[in-house]
Image (spheres, rainbow, N blue to C red):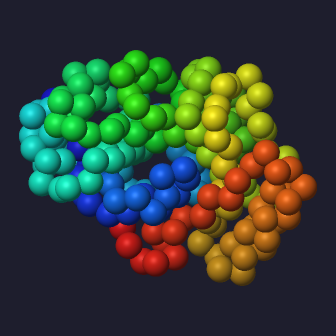
Amino acid sequence: MMRVNEIFYSLQGEGYHSGEAAVFIRLSGCNLHCPFCDTVHEDGEEMPEEAIVAAVARHPARLVVVTGGEPALQLTPSLVEALHAAGRMVVVETNGTHPLPPNVDWVTLSPKDAFLGAQAMPVLTKADELKVVYDGEREPSTYADIAVAHRFLQPMDCGDPQRNARITAATVDYIGRHPQWRLSLQIHKMINIK
């Protein structure tokens, strides 16, 4: 049984798979409390893995994004394997503070230690993509000790449109000076989808 906040169908709004149709499994709970978190993930219902897979199977997209909160607190190798058996690719969005099942297809690592300190340091040593939330002020870490294929810098959404515009401009400027980064925008917010 896993505590599931919601399962929904939409487009991936950020990072490498941005714009792709995806089924989202939002697991309840997180070990961190980020000041800019825009997700209500605490509530949920206990669901067996078979029910989760059945809910995912109602949608045609191959991409399944397991998110939270922090999905590593609950995600099991058996759920990943069941999703594979259903023909799905499993992407996990994680803060990296806990290990993941080894059979996950794609890891999106979004560390939060810049905002929360040592308690939020990632333990993962590799990921497919690194997505760093940038506040436009602090020098973002490149996490050079973590093997990643793709590096994304994402402007922090603080809820204030004027400050958000300044943060986005600072992010664009930073990427122009540090081209190892790519821009990640939260397009789901821009086009008003879930």
Q: In the visual, does 188 lie left or right of 84?
A: right
- Please identify the quarter of the rendering in which residue 112 is found: top right
Q: Quadrant of the C terminus?
A: bottom left
Residues 85 and 51: in front is 85
Looking at the image, is 155 positioned above or below residue 114? below
Image coordinates of residue 170 in percent, x first then y, are 82, 65
Q: In the visual, does 85 lie left or right of 168?
A: left
Image coordinates of residue 1 in percent, x first then y, are 16, 30
Looking at the image, is 89 positioned above or below residue 37? above
Image coordinates of residue 53 in percent, x first then y, are 15, 40
Q: Residue at 79%, 65% (x, y): give it.
A: 172
Q: Residue at 68%, 58% (x, y): give it.
A: 183
How many marks do you count on the picture? 0
Residues 70 and 93: in front is 93
- Please identify the quarter of the rendering in which residue 66 is found: top left
Q: Residue at 46%, 78% (x, y): give it.
A: 191
Looking at the image, is 192 positioned above or below residue 150? below
Q: Residue furthest bottom?
A: 162
Q: In the visual, does 167 lie left or right of 185?
A: right
- Please identify the quarter of the rendering in which residue 22 is found: bottom left
Q: Residue at 46%, 41% (x, y): give it.
A: 93
Residues 41 and 125: in front is 125
